[in-house]
Image: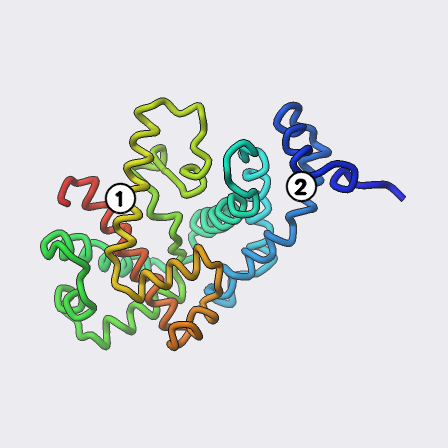
């Protein structure tokens, strides 16, 4: 019976070897080792997706994220590979979903309209806008706004990864990149990344309490939407709404920062 590399060496030893020689056999061993992690992340994403999105497709998208994580992981950073890989896997899944553009155009347009309204409203108010204020600015009732948010949260692919855009695609700064902090970055780029990271932390702290809790429980405590609903004593669909609103607020906050409004 053949002994696997992970039985012959410690994982730490294999990371050191892989960084030196990029041995395909070591990469394959890591892919097999962390394949269950891809299924776990894909399962969490699938829970908030329409039935038309196939679980196996999400797993396939996630594998690309795992491979990317393996190639870019730096064992000398004080970050566990699992923590680093989850972000890369989730990001790869969302990137692929966006690229196949399965979200209805009407939902995309409504999402953009709400985000632009939040940008203008919160820049004027200097604080997070309430549902009532957003609904009024949109010219709809609170009930209609709530129904619209439910529709958006049930179909859109909004992720915390989305808020790390500092402009065009070339300026994308993902959570994974900020954790990684590649040594190849020049000092100016690193300062810009650190500043955006600080702005995101500040923006999260300024979110309404329940929205902030949803982000912390989902992205940092790794709970499912259903589990978060049990913690907050609300329905799973309400948690999905809160998550979507939090992301829209964060993206609006970054938009205002880029425009120099706040």
Quadrant into which the N terminus falls: top right
Q: How many marks?
A: 2
Residue 256 against residue 191 in the figure, above or below: below
Q: Nearer the viewer, residue 46 or 220?
A: 220
Query: Which residue is the site of mark 1?
Result: 199
Q: Nearer the viewer, residue 113 or 146?
A: 146
As helix, strand or loop, the secondary structure at mark 2 comes to helix
Checking the image for residue 74, the label placed there is none
Residue 252 against residue 2 in the figure, above or below: below
Please tell me which of labels 1 and 2 falls first in the chain. Answer: 2
As helix, strand or loop, the secondary structure at mark 1 comes to helix
- Badge nearest the viewer, 1 or 2: 1
Mark 1 in CB contact with mark 2 (< 8 angstroms): no
Q: Residues within 10 Å of mark 2 (few under 14, many from 20)?
A: some
Task: From the top left corner, tell me how far across and down residue 253 is, in percent.
Answer: 23, 49
Instruction: Report, in whole angstroms, how far the alpha carbon at label 1 lies from the one at label 2.
Output: 34 Å
Q: How is the image coloured?
A: rainbow
Query: Which residue is the site of mark 2?
Result: 30
| Left/right of residue 203 with respect to residue 51 in the rendered view | left
Q: Residue furthest right?
A: 1
Quarter of the image for residue 218 reads: bottom left
Q: Residue at x 24, y 56 (%)?
A: 206
Task: From the top left corner, tell me how far across and down residue 155 is, in percent.
Answer: 40, 63
Q: Residue at x 34, y 69 (%)?
A: 151
Residue 5 against residue 182 in the figure, above or below: below
| Left/right of residue 199 with respect to residue 120 in the rendered view | right
Residue 15 against residue 37 in the figure, above or below: above
Q: Residues within 10 Å of mark 1 (few under 14, many from 20)?
A: some
Task: From the top left corner, tell me how far across and down residue 44 is, in percent.
Answer: 52, 61
Q: Residue at x 13, y 64 (%)?
A: 137
């Amino acid at each position: 019976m053949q002994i696997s590399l992970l039985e012959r060496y410690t994982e730490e030893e294999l990371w050191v070897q892989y960084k030196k020689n990029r041995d395909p056999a070591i990469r394959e061993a890591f892919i097999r080792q962390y394949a269950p992690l891809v299924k776990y992340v894909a399962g969490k994403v699938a829970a908030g997706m329409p039935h038309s999105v196939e679980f196996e497709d999400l797993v396939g998208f996630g594998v690309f994220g795992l491979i990317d994580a393996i190639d870019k992981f730096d064992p000398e950073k004080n970050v566990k590979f699992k923590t680093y890989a989850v972000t890369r896997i989730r990001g790869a899944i969302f990137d692929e979903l966006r690229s196949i553009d399965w979200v209805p155009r009407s939902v995309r347009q409504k999402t953009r309209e709400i985000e632009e309204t939040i940008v203008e409203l919160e820049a004027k108010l200097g604080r997070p806008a309430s549902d009532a204020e957003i609904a009024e600015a949109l010219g709809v009732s609170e009930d209609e706004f709530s129904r619209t948010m439910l529709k958006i949260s049930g179909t859109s692919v909004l992720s915390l990864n989305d808020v790390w855009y500092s402009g065009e695609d070339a300026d994308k700064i993902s959570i994974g990149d900020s954790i990684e902090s590649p040594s190849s970055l020049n000092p100016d780029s690193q300062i810009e990344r650190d500043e955006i990271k600080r702005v995101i932390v500040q923006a999260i702290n300024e979110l309404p309490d329940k929205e902030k809790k949803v982000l912390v429980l989902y992205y940092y405590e790794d709970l499912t939407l259903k589990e978060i609903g049990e913690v907050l004593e609300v329905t799973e669909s309400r948690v999905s709404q809160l998550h979507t609103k939090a992301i829209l607020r964060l993206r609006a906050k970054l938009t205002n920062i880029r425009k120099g409004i706040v």
